[in-house]
Amino acid sequence: MATPLDRPPAVIAVATAVAGALVALVLGLLTFGVQATAHPDRLPLAVAIGPDAPPPLRAVADKLAGTASQEVGWRVSTPDEARGLLASQDVYGVLELVPGGATVMLSGAVNPSGTQVAQQVLTGVAQGAGLPAKVVVLNPASTAGRTAPLAASALLWIAGLVAGAAFTVLARRPGAWSRLAGATTAAVLGVAVVAGFFALWDAELPLGWDVLGYLALVGAAFALLQAGLLRLLGLRAMAVLGPLYLMAPAVAGQVPELLDPVYRAVLWSWTPFRFSTEGLRALLQGGTVTGAQVWVFAGIAVAGLVLVLAGEKAQPDLADGVVDVGVDQADRLPGAQRQHTA
């Protein structure tokens, strides 16, 4: 039977070129395509105005609320209501109008990509209305605090991925419990690495039991899922697990309102990296994780555990593993007695 290496060199050259083009196509769609098509799509913003505001300011707020724009979705509210919307991340920024000026309110708990666009839009609106604007950031986050949530998600994934792939290559006849031990160790060490980076990048980043526990849940879910797929598919699972890692900074690093609707529906809607990133960002800014951000990873961990344990058979002892091939006791050759009789 002919093997791929027996093919003519020209055929191999064309086949490998096609494979390279397909890989480039997939990676381009998952990474650069997300960034190249990013644009505001109904970005939620609020304009805040007090009940006793003068008519000119009220006119500005009413004009914004009545603006038909595909890029921005405006909400008009009082200053107190607007701060609540910002705290709950129902809006990414607030433009508070006061006589003689305006205040652009942002929050460090909001995804930095959404905050950056919100600041640009709100500042431009204030300038267009002829109002001097100042920027106020609620719950400000340091550079490390803005980077840490996405970085932690990617590092926990890569820690489990490298450990699982290396185990698949090096281990001989691995059992379910050895895979489980490897996934658990990878998760624990991955959390230790992430916590060490947090302390190195910014000593003020919180590392309480809530943060460490959430990191442990995410790390365990990632490692178990990877171990299960590698047990099921072998190294072929890397064709799925590798591109998933590349999606982390491209997709989870954006707010959905900045993604093309196709990417939002096909990738962002289900990628686990967005849940881990947003949950960790909330914890680092003094908030709490939502139920979805916990149950998603609990479900992933259970699914990975099932894949690791499903169909696993106990390995026989060496004494029980001897196979009878009909060897004659005298001559040690199969069918020797029949040959002598003939």
Image: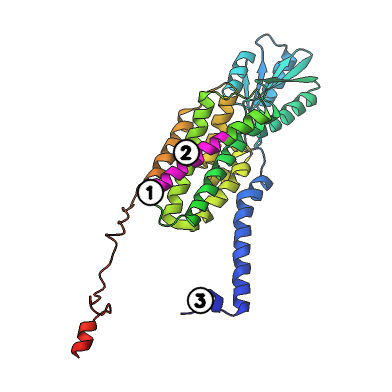
Sequence-wise, the earlier of marks 3 and 1 is: 3
Q: Of discs 3 and 1, which sits in the foreground? A: 1
Query: Which residue lies under the disc numbered 3?
Result: 3
The answer to the question of whether label 3 and label 1 lie on touching residues, with beta carbons closer than 8 A, is no
Farthest front residue in view: 330
Q: Residues within 10 Å of mark 1 (few under 14, many from 20)?
A: many
Q: The residue tagged with tag 3: helix, strand or loop?
A: loop
- Badge 3 amino acid: Thr
Q: Residue at x 62, y 18 (%)?
A: 83
Dot 1 or dot 2, earlier in sequence = 1
* Residue 268 counted in the magenta span: no
Name which residue type carries label 2.
Ala
Q: Secondary structure at mark 2?
A: helix
| Figure check: 140 above or below 257 | above
> Local crowd at mark 2 within 10 Å, few (<14), some, or many (≥20)?
many
Residue 11, given in percent of the width and then of the height, sits at 60, 77
Q: What is the three-letter code of the residue carrying label 1?
A: Ala
Q: Main secondary structure of the magenta part?
A: helix
The location of residue 106, given as percent across then percent down, is 68, 23
| Mark 3 crowdedness (10 Å alpha carbons): few <14, some 14-19, many ≥20 | few
Judged left or right of residue 1, residue 126 is right
Give the residue pinned by disc 2.
220
Determine which residue is flagged by label 1.
Answer: 176
Mark 1 and mark 2 residues within 8 Å of each other at the beta carbon: no
Looking at the image, residue 188 sits to the left or right of residue 315; the answer is: right
> Residue extending furthest left?
341
Q: Which residues are magenta?
A: 177-192
Residue 109 visible in the current orientation: yes
Please tell me which residue is depicted at 20% across the width and 91% down the height of the picture. 342
Task: Give me the C-alpha separation between circle 1 and circle 2.
Answer: 16 Å
Q: Which residue is at the far top?
A: 52
Quarter-of-image position of residue 155: top right
